[in-house]
Amino acid sequence: MQLWLIDDDPQIGSDLRLLLPRDIHLSQVIDSRTAVALLRKNSHPPDAIILDLCLPPYLAATEDHEGIALLDLLKAELAPQVPVYVLSSQPRTDYGQACLRHGAESYLEKPCSIRDLVNHLSSVGT
């Protein structure tokens, strides 16, 4: 499985690479601008995306709204069939339902266990 992590924290990507099963190939994209450019150029999107909500502003005015703006663009145009799993430090009570309404498969709060993340990803491709 090809998995993209869209998160500006390089430590998250390093940790996930060490802990995810070997059949999951992780690529980290550090901001919305890069993710949009890669998806527009690449005819083969990833099998799944893990998206952080707080990213440097590109599509939205503030980093607090960037993840939702990118989620909307992913689902509307760039990768509508690709499941997006939100992994964020933002409280579930404030953002969880909004992410689901905007097309996310699930919402996980940081920190979460790798087991929980892998369980959420297990439905990809089935």
Image (cartoon, helix red, strand yellow):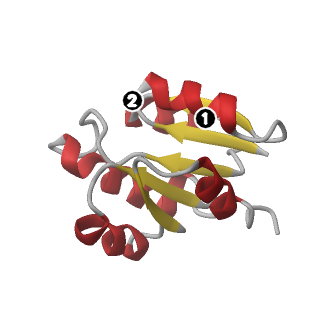
Which callout, 1 or 2, points at the residue further toward the start of the chain? 2
Residue 81 sits in quarter = bottom right
Q: Residue at x 79, y 46 (%)?
A: 1
- Residue 8 is labelled as 2
Q: Secondary structure at mark 1?
A: helix
Q: Answer left or right for 23 relative to 31.
A: right
Q: Answer left or right for 92 relative to 16.
A: left
Q: Residue at x 28, y 46 (%)?
A: 66
The reply to whether residue 123 is in sight is: yes
Residue 38 at x, y = what percent?
A: 57, 32
Residue 90 sits in quarter = bottom left
Q: Answer left or right for 67 relative to 51.
A: left
Q: Residue at x 57, y 29 (%)?
A: 15
Q: Residue at x 24, y 36 (%)?
A: 57
- Residue 71 is labelled as none
Residue 24 at x, y = what percent?
A: 77, 41
Mark 2, Cα crowd under 10 Å, few <14 / some 14-19 / many 20+, is some
Identify the amino acid type marked 1.
Answer: Leu
Q: CA distance from mark 1 to mark 2?
A: 14 Å
Q: Which is nearer the eye, 48 or 42? A: 48
Identify the amino acid type marked 2.
Answer: Asp
Which quadrant of the figure contains the C terminus? bottom right
Q: Secondary structure at mark 2?
A: loop
Q: In the rendered view, would you say 126 is above or below 116?
A: below
Q: In the rendered view, would you say 116 is above or below 62?
A: below
Q: Which residue matches tag 1?
A: 16
Q: Which is nearer the eye, 6 or 94? A: 94
Residue 114 at x, y = what percent?
A: 61, 48
